Image (cartoon, grey):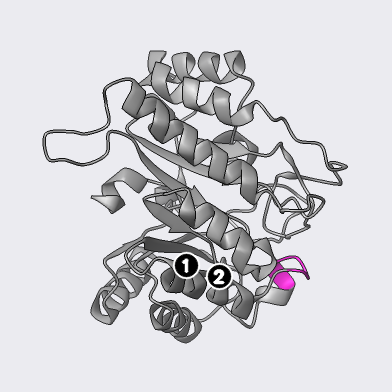
Amino acid sequence: MPKPSWLKTRLPTGAEFDRVNELLRKYHLNTVCSNARCPNLTECWNSGTATLMILGDVCTRSCRFCAVQKGNPGGRIDETEPERIAQLVQELGIKYLVLTSVDRDDLSDLGAGVFARAVRLVKQNACADGKSADPNGAAGVRVEVLVPDFGGQEGLIKQVVDSGPDVFGHNLETVERLTPLVRDRRAGYRLSLAVLQKVKELAPGMLTKSGLMVGLGETMHEVIATLKDLRSVGCDIVTIGQYLQPSRRALPVARYWGLEEFKTIQDAGEKMGFKRVFAAPLVRSSYRAAELFR
């Protein structure tokens, strides 16, 4: 199935891309940009930003839309990773950081502790560096987390919420009917909605965010119903983009959605009361995250 012209992207190039790539190697950090083969890699890296993928690069779940390596990390984590993240943020001068991760069902806390430490250290470093506030009184470094479901455990969700991220993200990924086909059997449509709802119960003022893919066989009616479900649990920000098959083993694209269809989705979401809706073919969860936050 040929790709529409609006899905073509440039190969990664540029001095800023090279600088970011060099620093990522220096601090031994992973990005979801390259591991998940994001189509926006060039644009984001050339702007001096990257979404960091913590807790290693091996995922314990087997979602059928993802190119990240699957397996069992055996309970191993790098205890120094949060410190290296804080150093990278300082050296690059990042003002908006997105932290995501593989699923780590092999850990007793499912990775929540590393998320919480990383958020705290990034913000503490900003304060220590004298960048704790801008002229408008806002924090110098905004941190968005895009987390796994943590099995829906309130205590683990609370660990991350209490660390003080500016945005708490968890992706629904697809419509309810397709969830068993697209996501790992341990994931769940209602479980993911419950995670977002729990964040609002724990911290009513915290912004919540979720993302969807289209092109896996869903209908417009199902997408609109999914947006309504997200609003029902207080989700503030939603991103919707075209699914692109990242590897031969991943699910094939069922169809490419048109630009007018994305506009229909965006208009419907805005009418429902989301604070921000970003729907376009190349949109991904962390694409232009700072812009969506503003």
Left or right, 45 with reference to 23: left
Q: Is mark 1 on a helix, strand or loop?
A: helix
Quadrant placement of the N terminus: bottom right
Q: In the orientation shown, which residue stands out farthest toward the left?
A: 135
The residue where tag 1 is placed is 199
- Residue drawn at x 46%, y 67% is 257
- Relative to the observer, which residue lies in front, 109 or 219? 109
Residue 50 lies, in percent from the top left, at: 46, 33
* Residue stretch rendered in magenta on the structure: 181-186
Total marks shown come to 2
- Relative to the observer, which residue lies in front, 30 or 260? 30
Q: Residues within 10 Å of mark 1 (few under 14, many from 20)?
A: many
* In this view, 211 is above or below 234: above
Q: How crowded is mark 2: few (under 14 residues within 10 Å), some or many (20 or more)?
A: many
- Relative to the observer, which residue lies in front, 99 or 218? 99
- Relative to the observer, which residue lies in front, 155 or 32? 155
